[in-house]
Amino acid sequence: MIQRLLQTKLSELIQKYPIVTLTGPRQSGKSTLLRYSFPDYKYVSLEDPDMRLFATDDPRGFLSTYPDKTIIDEAQRVPTLFSYIQTHTDKVGKEGMYLLAGSHNFLLMENINPSLAGRTAILKLLPFSHTEMKQGGILPSSIDEEIFKGNYPRLYDKNIAPSDYYPFYVQTYIERDVRLMKNIGDLSKFIRFIKLCAGRIGQLLNLSSLANECGVAVSTISAWISVLEASYVCYLLKPDYNNYAKRLVKTPKLYFYDTGLACSLLDIRTSEQVSTHFLRGGLFENMVINEFIKSSYNRGEEPSLTFWRDSTGNEVDLLQYVNGKQYAYEIKSGATFSPDFFKGISKWAKLSGANSDQCFAIYNGDNNMQTSSGKLIKWPELII
């Protein structure tokens, strides 16, 4: 098994809480991580109809059968079980009793928040990070291949071609999860919507444009975006609201949690196509921002990330708060340095009063460089 960076935090929190909850997209490796990290725990999946019926019809009997040291996978499938777990763990009063896992963030959190508040730590596991793949000896040979192949563990574990993996992933997981969360009458429109989202990676979210192209109401698009967020397909990067005496864009930008899935939705069939695709810059930017997100989640933290754009078009791709201090990152897929890399950052630094040590440009070249405007960093030597 490839060592997951989240394992350290997981092992730490299971000694402090009676319950630890692990959420994330389907096939991100949650079950494998839990079973590998805690081999002495029993494993139960509520995807199993018999187990689901047992937990639903006789929750007390279920918890009597599994009173301690149990992994409960797809726990959101039986929401009534959470209150019984709360009562049981409160009565026993010890740490490390249950590990809950689930792939529906909305459904899982909807039941955890009222029932298990203060009793569970909540961690998120995304597909492999660049560091995990490098340490595991499975890193793709080029940037374009890494973008194209994505990071889902099963691709590497079973040596599955992305062209075989992702279409079935969409059919068997996304479509099913969507129907569990929301009653969508015309699934073909929803699939068209996801494909349109893939074509807007790194762009400001325009609900009206998506609604027009899909032939549905703006309110429907807004609901569908929430579904994609809850099932860990897409996320919205919010704009920074520090005004600095300039009117700022207040619309979020759209990204995918996995670039391999995005490539499949864009009908990109080989890594060679990535290098000439009109969205290569957006896909590279998406991959880099994903690494920042994974780094935060692997430390058990929520990412503190935004972007900055003013009304005249000056922009910084990524702002990160670290200990109350902001760091700015421009992300470029090109391999040749240009002073223009720091154009937007320099404008932001002047308005915000930031120093050059808070300014970075990440690119696809071979050399690091210190400039008067900030530091040029070659991917993947991120300073996170």
Image (cartoon, grey):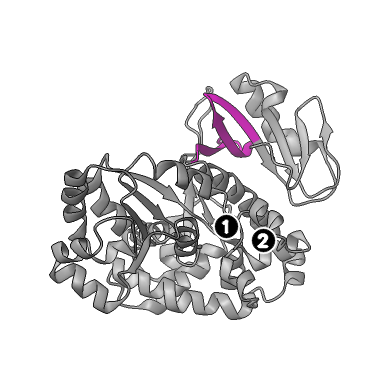
Image position of 196 (left or right of 86): right
Closer to the camera in the image, 4 or 194: 4
Q: Which residue lies at the image location 58% right of the left edge and 66% below the top edge?
A: 153
Q: Quadrant of residue 339?
A: top right
Query: Residue 371: x percent and y percent?
Result: 82, 28
Q: Which residues are magenta?
A: 303-328
Do labels 1 and 2 touch, CB within 8 Å?
yes
Q: Quadrant of residue 283?
A: bottom right
> Can residue 132 be found in the magenta stretch?
no
Q: Can residue 190 be seen here?
A: no
Q: Quadrant of the N terminus?
A: bottom right
Q: Can residue 311 be seen here?
A: yes
Q: Quadrant of the C terminus?
A: top right
- Tell me the amino acid under the disc marked 1: Ile
Whether residue 3 is situated above or below residue 16 in the rendered picture: below
Magenta stretch prevailing secondary structure: strand
Q: Which residue is mark 1?
A: 201
Query: Residue 166: x percent and y percent?
Result: 55, 74
Q: Which residue lies at the image location 27% right of the left edge and 66% below the top edge?
A: 77
Query: Residue 130: x percent and y percent?
Result: 66, 53
Task: Indicate the secondary structure of the residue bearing disc 1.
Answer: loop
Query: Residue 277: x percent and y percent?
Result: 71, 66
Q: Report the Cα–Cα distance between label 1 and label 2.
A: 8 Å
Sequence-earlier tag: 1 or 2: 1
Q: Which residue is mark 2?
A: 279
> Can residue 306 be found in the magenta stretch?
yes
Image position of 373 (left or right of 55): right
Closer to the camera in the image, 217 or 175: 175
- Tell me the amino acid under the disc marked 2: Leu
